[in-house]
Image (cartoon, helix red, strand yellow):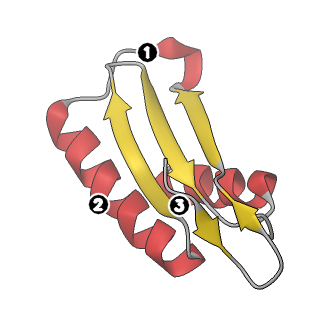
Amino acid sequence: MEVAKSRGCVYALEYHIVWCVKYRRKILTEEILSSLKTILLTLAEDMDVKIVEFNGEADHIHVLISCKPTHYIPDIVQRMKGVSS
């Protein structure tokens, strides 16, 4: 975990986000996961968020993100889920 410094604070924030496919259907293949990873990396760069780790299985994915304290986590998750769908 990297410790970052801002103008008035020192922080190290990481969030583990997990979301499932509807009805937990096993539809995520390796191709879909790699495509999803590139989409999320591009989106994270636009939002000034760093994806530390990305992993997935057939029915869910795990994303570990690092962000600034000024970011609002529900907005990040909403954009990630919305764009990736």
**Location of mark 1 (residue):** 25
Residue 41: x and y in percent read 37, 63
Separation of residues labelled 3 and 1 (CA atoms): 20 Å
Which of the two discs, 2 and 3, sits closer to the camera?
A: 2
Q: Classify 77 as above or below 16.
A: below
- Residue neighbourhood size for the residue with mark 3, other residues' Cα within 10 Å, grouped as few (<14), some (14–19), many (≥20): few
Residue identified by numbered label 3: 83
Asked if residue 51 lies left or right of residue 75, the reply is left
Q: SS at mark 1?
A: loop
Extreme residue in the bottom direction: 7
The type of residue carrying mark 2 is: Thr
Callout 1–callout 2 Cβ contact below 8 Å: no
Asked which quadrant contains residue 20, the reply is top right
SS at circle 2: helix
Task: Answer with left or right where residue 53 lies relative to residue 62.
Answer: left
Please state which of residues 53 and 18 is positioned toward the viewer in this rendering: 53
Q: Residue at x 71, y 79 (%)?
A: 6
Mark nearest the camera among 3 and 1 is 3
Of label 2 and label 3, which has the lower sequence position?
Answer: 2
Q: Amino acid at mark 3?
A: Val
Residue bearing the label numbered 2: 38
Residue at figure coordinates x 79%, y 52% from the top left: 74
Residue 55 at x, y percent in the picture: 33, 33
